[in-house]
């Protein structure tokens, strides 16, 4: 009897402890909830709000009656000049991304293959330096370099006194230069992360079998670093086509892009529905471009679709 009573008491105690325990999923939810909650509040909620605005006929803070319509999304048909501006933005985005990919890959290759540990750390800090300075300061510094009579002109005239002016401020190449300066670190870092994971034995084996340097570069290093190149391209292309500071400051009259038009709709014309509609239209175009190129990359690398 005493033994049965002890077993009964132990069972009751274990049951009470079991009832007091939290479910197994509770710690995971508790850890993820702050992150995803902030992501929803800071990213998805503003996007959802702008999406609702894009279907309105007027800014909701005004006095005009609100009617939901598709008029804003017809702007590319009713205002054909927007098609040319969008095409210009895409061209600038492609030029910037390709320039960053070429420069960033070779910079990351030199960083990963040809530098000692201490020198590598120093160069990584120098690569990150642009992130430590204000964007406006970087852009205005380029105006001092690229304008007529600026630093670039002074260097050229010092080397060749009879040469004409080489300043190209307020041109589309000037916009690309400023954008490459701002977004090149993203490409270098993503390519560097991909390149440092490549085993040196693979390169050494190819060289011992008689492979030329260009064969090693284009048949081994570039394909194996493709995930880093693609990641850097995404991190570069998406913000570039929506940028407005570089086109406005370095482009002048020719710096009219979708980024500047959208900014004007929000800050000057106070036409938030049109600005939101233009933003989501460009977002759809970007997603379509990446969907197309992701399929090409999968077929090129032999990965299953």
Image (tube, rainbow, N blue to C red):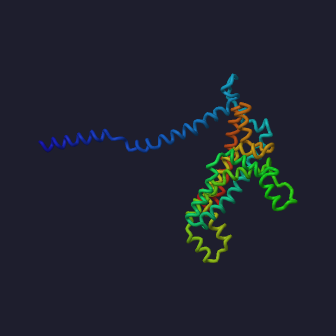
Q: Residue at coordinates 65% horizontally, 61% vertically from top-left?
A: 107
Quadrant assignment for the N terminus = top left
Q: Where is residue 270 in the image (x, y as percent from the top left)?
A: 71, 30
| Label total for image | 0
Residue closest to the eye, 268 or 265: 268
Residue closest to the eye, 175 or 190: 175
Q: Is 22 left, or right, of 209 in this rendering?
A: left
Q: Position of residue 304 (x, y in %)?
A: 59, 58
Q: Is 115 left, or right, of 249 in this rendering?
A: left
Indicate the quadrant where residue 103 lies. bottom right
List the single residue furthest toward the left. Answer: 1
Q: Where is residue 272 in the image (x, y as percent from the top left)?
A: 69, 32
Q: Position of residue 203 (x, y in %)?
A: 59, 71
Residue 294 in sight: no
Q: Residue at coordinates 55% horizontally, 37% vertically from top-left?
A: 41
Residue closest to the eye, 185 or 298: 185
Quadrant assignment for the C terminus = bottom right
Indicate the quadrant where residue 156 lies. bottom right
Q: Is 304 left, or right, of 33 in this rendering?
A: right
Q: Is 199 left, or right, of 171 in this rendering?
A: left
Residue 288 in sight: yes
């Amino acid at each position: 009897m005493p033994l049965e009573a002890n077993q009964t008491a132990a069972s009751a105690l274990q049951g009470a402890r079991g009832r007091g325990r939290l479910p197994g999923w509770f710690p995971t939810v508790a850890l993820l909830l702050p992150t995803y909650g902030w992501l929803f509040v800071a990213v998805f909620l503003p996007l959802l709000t702008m999406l609702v605005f894009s279907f309105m006929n007027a800014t909701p803070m005004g006095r005009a009656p609100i009617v939901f319509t598709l008029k804003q999304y017809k702007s590319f048909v009713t205002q054909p000049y927007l098609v040319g501006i969008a095409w210009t933005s895409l061209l600038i985005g492609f030029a910037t991304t390709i320039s960053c990919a070429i420069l960033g890959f070779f910079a990351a290759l030199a960083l990963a293959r040809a530098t000692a540990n201490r020198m590598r750390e120093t160069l990584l800090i120098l690569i990150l330096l642009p992130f430590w300075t204000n964007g406006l300061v970087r852009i205005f510094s380029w105006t001092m370099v690229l304008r007529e009579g600026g630093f670039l002109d002074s260097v050229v005239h010092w080397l060749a006194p009879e040469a004409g002016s080489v300043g190209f401020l307020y041109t589309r190449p000037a916009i690309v230069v400023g954008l490459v300066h701002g977004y090149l670190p993203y490409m270098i870092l993503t390519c560097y992360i991909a390149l440092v994971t490549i085993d040196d034995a693979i390169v050494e084996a190819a060289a011992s079998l008689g492979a030329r340097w260009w064969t090693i570069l284009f048949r081994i290093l570039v394909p194996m670093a493709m995930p880093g190149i693609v990641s850097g391209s995404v991190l570069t292309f998406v913000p570039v086509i929506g940028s407005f500071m570089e086109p406005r400051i370095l482009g002048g009259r020719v710096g009219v892009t979708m980024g500047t038009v959208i900014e004007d709709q929000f800050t000057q014309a106070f036409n938030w529905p049109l600005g939101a509609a233009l933003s989501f239209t460009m977002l759809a175009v970007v997603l379509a471009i990446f969907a197309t190129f992701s399929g090409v990359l999968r077929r090129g690398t032999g990965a299953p679709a």
